[in-house]
Image (cartoon, rainbow, N blue to C red):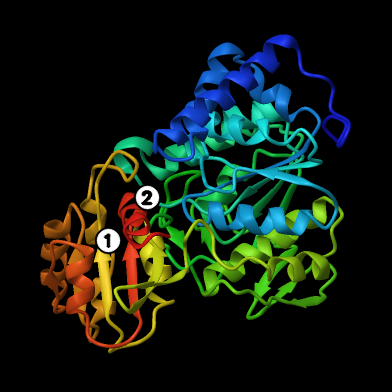
Amino acid sequence: MSGHPGNPEPLSPRAKLAVTAGKAAAAVSRAAGRGSGSVIGGRVALKLDPDLLGRLAQHLDVVLVSATNGKTTTTRLIAEALRASGPVVSNALGANMPAGITSALAGGSDARFGVIEVDEKYLAGVARDTTPKAIALLNLSRDQLDRAAETRMLAEKWREGLNGTKAVVIANADDPLIVWAASSSPNVVWVAAGQMWKDDAWSCPACGGVMQRPGDDWFCGECGFRRPAPSWALSGDHVLDPHGSAWPIRLQLPGRANKANAATSAAVAAVFGVPPQVALERMYQVQAVAGRYDVVSFQGRDLRLLLAKNPAGWLETFSLIDGPPAPVILSVNARGADGTDTSWLWDVDYGRLAGHPIMVIGDRKLDLAVRLEVAGVDFRVCETLDEAVAMAPPGQIELIANYTAFQDVRRRVGN
């Protein structure tokens, strides 16, 4: 177990100065209306004390959460579950690179647990700095291709970075890339959390051979790399624990993907001694995560806000929305935080939206319009959210947006 939970060693004068300066920089950023200030605050603090992240984590029992999709939600669910055993500090708003993580931990001197979402590129480094007790790995799929590179390379980087880690790794047995990444770790808890999107895992990450996928199973016919036997599993509306007991999942968050996130979270909570029943009951408290799944009122209409950042995320989101004739607004940007390459739009099956009245907005609305035209679905291009809402026929509007487009919408509707 790392450190002495609840009994932090006093910070050095240099570390104290770094924390104070970081908080001051964050306050200035907030006062200037530039967001939460967590990233700039963390950058300033790390400049003054490059080892600050490790110092701030030393008294915590840390769990790291990384994946392409579901990191922020799973981090929230785990944090809620662990609060059953003591105070938690977490980067709940999704600032998941070292600066944002440092900022979050700077506010957690009284915490026992640190529940930290980590950007995929930084996982190995943050694991080195924070000596986690547990690491949750959910899925890997293509995203931000101009920044994060190819998924198999990322899986390889994780595999090297986690080789021999003392942490318990809680990993999705249904994603071959995750299994490959986790297999270098000596202590892995496998969870059958499912995998709806399979298009990034048809070749074997071990040898490059073609994956065989009979039913829910998978294996490589050439080198024998195969799905491990899970000790936890999502089964309908229940989580099966290692003893075969079924625990009901009751969430306010919609969809199968969030049940999978809850199953993984229950397995993580068990590592820290929180029983499944207690963990799952606590997860029911989570209603929305950084605006995701919120229903907001705007111009006299109800809008449900849904975030989908990449092909795997869009596929899961299509399974959440009300059926036709529910109106749908789609918004796509391609700014730095989204990845500037929009070629991923061609990997999304927009034909699933047939029958919905569709309005298209966002910086890259014309890219999306071409994709919808090819998919053969009807749509209208609108200049603004206001115009799209005004054009939408009656009923709750399903609004699906990628990362910066989602933030634009939240600002406009005052969420």
Task: Residue 133 in the image: state x and y as whole percent.
Answer: 77, 39
* 306 relative position to 348: left or right: right
Task: Residue 359 in the image: state x and y as whole percent.
Answer: 19, 72
Query: What is the C-alpha distance between the residues marked 2 and 1?
Result: 10 Å
- Disc 2 on helix, strand or loop? loop
Question: What residue is rendered at 52% in x and 34% in y?
Answer: 38
Compare residues 30 and 242 and report the one nearer the observer. Answer: 30
User: Badge 1, how many Cα within 10 Å: few under 14, some, many 20+?
Assistant: some
Q: Amino acid at mark 2?
A: Arg
Q: Is residue 113 above or below residue 10?
A: below
Compare residues 95 and 216 and report the one nearer the observer. Answer: 95
Q: Is residue 255 above or below residue 176?
A: below
Question: What residue is rendered at 32% in x and 87% in y?
Answer: 395
Q: Is residue 408 above or below residue 192?
A: above
Task: Determine which of the numbered discs, if any, sits on residue 49 in the image.
Answer: none
Question: What residue is rendered at 32% in x and 46% in y?
Answer: 338
> Where on the picture, by quarter, is residue 341?
top left
User: Badge 2, how many Cα within 10 Å: few under 14, some, many 20+?
Assistant: some
Give the total of numbered labels.
Answer: 2
Compare residues 103 and 127 and report the one nearer the observer. Answer: 103
Task: Determine which of the numbered discs, if any, sits on residue 142 in the image.
Answer: 2
Task: Residue 325 in the image: state x and y as whole percent.
Answer: 28, 89
Q: Is residue 122 visible?
A: no
Q: Are marks 2 and 1 in contact (CB under 8 Å)?
A: yes
Q: Amino acid at mark 1?
A: Asp
Residue holding disc 1: 347
Question: What residue is rendered at 62% in x and 17% in y?
Answer: 18
